[in-house]
Image (spheres, grey):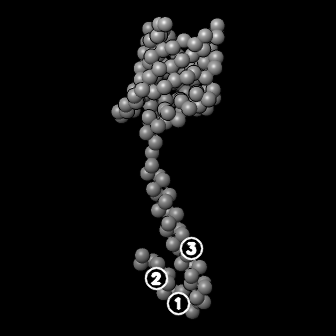
Amino acid sequence: MKNMSNFLTILLQFKMKKSLIIIALFIVTSNVSAQTKNNHLKQIKMTNTAILHKANEFVKNGDNESFLAYCTPNTKWVFVGERILNGKEEVRAYMKEFYLEPPVFSVEKAIEEDNFVMVTGEIRLRNKAGKYEYFDYCDIWRFEDGKIAELKAFVIEKKP
């Protein structure tokens, strides 16, 4: 605030026109407002749950590459009792094989603690025969620097 009053004093000493003073004040206050807004935006950080939901929207829309941008290069996916995928390339191949069309899934619960997000829900996948298969899942996601580093998935097929 002191700098602003010094600025006004200097302007008045040089007997600037009233319109120039108004313009100068507008510029000074605009800069202060922009700096305040930028500082506020820097403080906002997405939660890991929000990051996961945003990434999963790409999967729902069939855009697996955009989803993979949310993963670390060495991401590890463990499907308990079934398989382990190491790195983006293996995850990409898995998605290509099993997501013949975008999966349909719902989230029942999402719980976040530290770098982990646990999600439960249901997922429906179309198989190679064109029939839907239904599953319940419990996923535990681990994040590093806002990216998906690991998945431990417990998936149970629903029997008709």
Q: Quadrant of residue 139?
A: top left
Q: Reply above or below: 128 against 72.
A: above
Give the mark, 2 or 3, whose residue is nearer the N terminus: 2
In space, the residues marked 1 and 2 are separated at their CA atoms by 10 Å
| Label disc, if present, on residue 12 of the rendered structure | 1
| Residue 125 seen in render | yes
Of tags 2 and 3, which is closer to the observer?
3
Q: Quadrant of residue 129?
A: top right
Task: Residue 14 in the image: state x and y as whole percent.
Answer: 56, 91
Q: Reply above or below: 31 against 108.
A: below
Residue type, numbered disc 3: Ile
Task: Residue 54 in the image: state x and y as whole percent.
Answer: 53, 35
> Residue at horizontal 55%, vertical 75%?
26
Q: Secondary structure at mark 3?
A: helix
Residue type, numbered disc 1: Leu
In space, the residues marked 2 and 3 are separated at their CA atoms by 15 Å
> Residue at horizontal 53%, vertical 68%?
31
Which residue carries the number 3 mark? 27
Task: Residue 69 in the image: state x and y as whole percent.
Answer: 58, 32
Which residue carries the number 2 mark? 6
